[in-house]
Image (cartoon, rainbow, N blue to C red):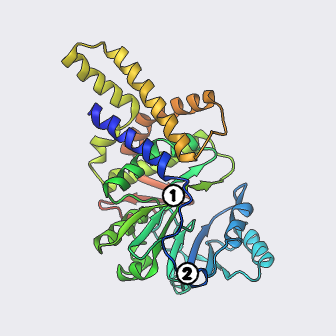
């Protein structure tokens, strides 16, 4: 177990340092003006502190042919004013705003916030569908994903989160994140279109599975996708992690056994116990040394994912890392205790296989 832990850590560190943030020359010699059209799907609810600045980047892309599809569920949502302001500021950009519950699926799409009604589906006209960001793909790659990196959540999104995604990508497993992925529309259409995945909370996983089942390959982008969500609290982060843990447990039951022992403190205790019984080493000394090694590997990996020096001090990193690692058992047990998920204004009951039903107030 210890060998596999260090092997995965070393592999991820080397891959993140060498592969991410590289400005590779395009192998596709297709002229710029003939690049495939791209549909950017952007569901919205409420106004985050940096919403207008984040959305404006969609309107300023250097790409020959793309459309921006904005969708808001409620007619009184303040995000509508932000959208209209940008639509007026960039009249030459092919962008449209969809308002109303007809834009939303009844229970589906956690990451895309349930926006796949017929009105919006019929408006996806381009060859490639993008969730959040655009990356290059060649003729053999159907799905390209980017690691998500938040200015406020860098310690998690630069250590634990990419460890699983990068290692899975290197070994060929299906592992994508709906926060930032790009896929070919015609392949999604073969799988029943976007609406076919509306029954799932974690639609990104099932999209990836459908794509892989059709023989397409996956690729990871060489640049991370920056998040800029504004203020973020520990309780919000905790709720988000609990929700994700519930999804993993529901879709992949083996998570109940594998997930706890993949975290630093539990893994260090288990390995320390084994080392004590096999080699008669002191458990606590081994535990501290193992945690220190994990801590250092995570720091190197975080720098590799970010592509340079961190924007906070080593002390800030140490405190954030310790808090995050200390929360893992509580997050896991909380996910086991209550199988329901609260998302935005709705509550959903998870079913086996990844589907969910909305819990309606009586």
Query: In the rendered view, does 274 fall on the left or right side of 162?
Result: left
- Expressed as whole percent of the image width and height from the top left, the position of residue 158 reads 52, 44
- Expressed as whole percent of the image width and height from the top left, the position of residue 82 reads 75, 68
Quadrant housing the N terminus: top left
Which numbered disc flags the more N-terminal residue, 2 or 1?
2
- Residue plotted at (51% across, 49% down): 240
Where residue 217 sits, quadrant-wise, is bottom left
Q: SS for tag 1? A: loop
Depth check, front residue: 27 or 301: 27
Where residue 273 sits, quadrant-wise, is top left
Residue corresponding to mark 2:
35
The vertical placement of 16 against 79, above or below, is above
Query: In the rendered view, does 83 fall on the left or right side of 261?
Result: right
Residue corresponding to mark 1:
222
The vertical placement of 167 against 287, above or below, is below
Depth check, front residue: 120 or 182: 182
């Amino acid at each position: 177990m210890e060998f596999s832990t260090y092997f995965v850590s070393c592999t991820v560190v080397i891959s993140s340092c060498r592969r991410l943030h590289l400005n590779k020359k395009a192998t596709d010699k297709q002229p710029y003006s003939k690049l495939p059209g791209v549909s950017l799907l952007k569901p919205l609810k409420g106004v985050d502190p940096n919403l207008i600045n984040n959305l404006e980047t969609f309107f300023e892309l250097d790409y020959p042919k793309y459309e921006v599809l904005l969708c808001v569920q409620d007619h009184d949502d303040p995000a509508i004013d932000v959208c209209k302001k940008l639509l007026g500021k960039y009249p030459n950009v092919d962008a449209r705003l969809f308002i109303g519950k007809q834009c939303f699926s009844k229970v589906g799409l956690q990451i895309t916030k349930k926006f796949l009604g017929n009105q919006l589906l019929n408006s996806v006209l381009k060859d490639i569908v993008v969730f959040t960001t655009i990356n290059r793909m060649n003729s053999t790659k159907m799905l390209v994903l980017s690691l998500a990196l938040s200015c406020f959540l860098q310690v998690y999104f630069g250590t634990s989160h990419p460890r699983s995604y990068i290692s899975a990508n290197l070994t060929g497993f299906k592992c994508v994140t709906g926060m930032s992925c790009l896929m070919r529309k015609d392949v999604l259409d073969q799988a029943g279109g976007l609406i076919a995945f509306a029954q799932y909370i974690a639609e990104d996983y099932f999209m990836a599975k459908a794509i892989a089942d059709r023989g397409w390959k996956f690729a990871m982008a060489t640049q991370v996708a920056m998040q800029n969500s504004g203020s973020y609290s520990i309780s919000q982060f905790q709720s988000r992690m609990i929700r994700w843990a519930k999804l993993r447990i529901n879709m992949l039951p083996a998570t109940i056994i594998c997930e706890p022992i993949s975290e630093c403190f539990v893994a260090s205790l288990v390995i320390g116990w084994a080392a004590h019984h096999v080699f008669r080493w002191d458990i606590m000394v081994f535990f501290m040394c193992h945690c220190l090694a994990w801590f250092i590997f995570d720091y190197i990996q975080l720098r590799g994912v970010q592509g340079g020096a961190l924007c906070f001090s080593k002390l800030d990193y140490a405190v954030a890392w310790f808090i995050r690692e200390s929360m893992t058992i509580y997050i896991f047990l909380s996910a086991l205790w209550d199988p329901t998920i609260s998302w935005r204004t709705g509550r959903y009951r998870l079913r086996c296989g990844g589907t969910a039903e909305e819990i309606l107030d009586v």
